[in-house]
Image: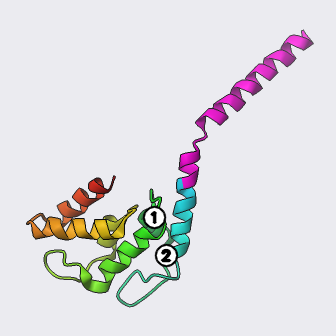
Amino acid sequence: MKTSITHCRLIKLAAAVSLITLSFNPISAQATDHETECFNSVQGKIPWNDEKNMNWDPKNIKQLCAGTTKPTQPGACYLSVLDGRVNWGKGISWDWQNIINLCAGTNNAKNTVDCFQQAVGKGLDWRDAILFCQRAEK
């Protein structure tokens, strides 16, 4: 009886270890590393507003960096838009949340900004242009 209980426990333990091993995805672990790198390249280094405040709310940086595999690109995208080089259809002054929405997870800041400018230039509403360029990035 004692031996069968021990065998049963070993089988359950082996099944649990197998399940954990199979559910571990090294790609998502790498993405987390990239996102952490991105977070560290933004906080205290890139201003989030026109007043040059570099103390970001961590949840905003996490949104900006989510999904990137090129840690410098979301911050570079954000900065290029914030610096006033991108017209959203009615000017160059952006709401910070809209910049995050455009640049979130990008792996190529220049392509994201160029996509947006081209879409708006062709008459697409800025909100639709953000959605279009987010999808184009994936």
**In the rendered view, would you say 131 is above or below 24?**
below
Q: Which residue is mark 2?
A: 42
Whether residue 7 appears in magenta in the rendering, the answer is: yes
The residue under label 2 is which amino acid type? Val
Quadrant housing residue 108: bottom left
For the residue pair 111 and 24, the one nearer the viewer reads as 111
Residue occupying the far right of the picture: 2
In the rendered view, does 53 fall on the left or right side of 116? right
Residue 43 x %, y %: 52, 77
Q: Which residue is mark 1?
A: 65
**In the rendered view, would you say 100 is above or below 137?**
below
**Magenta residues, start to end:** 1-30
**In the rendered view, would you say 23 is above or below 111?**
above
Whether residue 31 appears in magenta in the rendering, the answer is: no
In the rendered view, does 86 fall on the left or right side of 44? left
For the residue pair 10 and 74, the one nearer the viewer reads as 74
